[in-house]
Image (tube, helix red, strand yellow):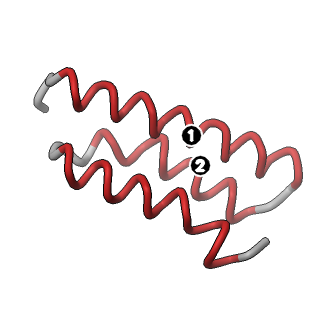
Amino acid sequence: MDLDVGNIILSLIFSTFGLIYFRYGKRLAKVPWIATGFVLMVYPYFVHSRVWMALIGVLLMLVPRYVWRS
């Protein structure tokens, strides 16, 4: 794993959004938000490119709002 400052910052940003999505979904009992939050918290461990990390993170953040519309 590359310990680049950019990767660490992106990982922190998307993991924070993942925690927010997870807690929101848990509070309202909405499984799509919980699942997306969990994936947002975990995927930075497996993606090492900043470009891919940003692209995947933004797409994941849009999934519950526009795909499931819950």
Q: Secondary structure at mark 1?
A: helix
Against 31, is 21 above or below? above
For the residues labelled 1 and 2, say whether their Cβ atoms are less than 8 Å apart: yes
Amino acid marked by disc 1? Phe
Residue furthest to the left: 2
- Per the rendering, the mark at residue 41 is none
Q: Residue at x 63, y 74 (%)?
A: 66
Question: Looking at the rendering, in which quadrant would you find the C terminus?
Answer: bottom right
Residue drawn 61% across and 58% down?
A: 35
* Mark identifier at residue 17: 1
Q: Residues within 10 Å of mark 2 (few under 14, many from 20)?
A: many
**Of residues 62 and 33, which is closer to you in this image?**
62
Question: 22 left or right of 17?
Answer: right
Image check: 6 left or right of 70? Answer: left
Residue behind mark 2? 37
Picture coordinates of residue 3, whole percent (x, y): 15, 23
**Quadrant placement of the N terminus:** top left
Quarter-wise, where is residue 36 in the image? bottom right
Task: Decide: few, some or many residues near mark 1? Use Cα within 10 Å; few <14, some 14-19, many ≥20.
Answer: some
Quick check: 52 above or below 50? below
Q: Residue most toward the right?
A: 28
> How many numbered discs sit on the rendered protein?
2
**What residue is shown at x 34% (from left), y 34% (from top)?**
10
Looking at the picture, how far across and down is residue 33, in whole percent? 69, 58
Residue 23 lies in quadrant: top right
* Gap in angstroms between the C-alphas marked 1 and 2: 7 Å
- Which comes sooner in the sequence, label 1 or label 2? 1
Residue type at mark 2: give it. Gly
Q: Is residue 28 above or below residue 30?
A: above
- Residue displayed at 37% across by 48% down: 43
Q: Secondary structure at mark 2?
A: helix
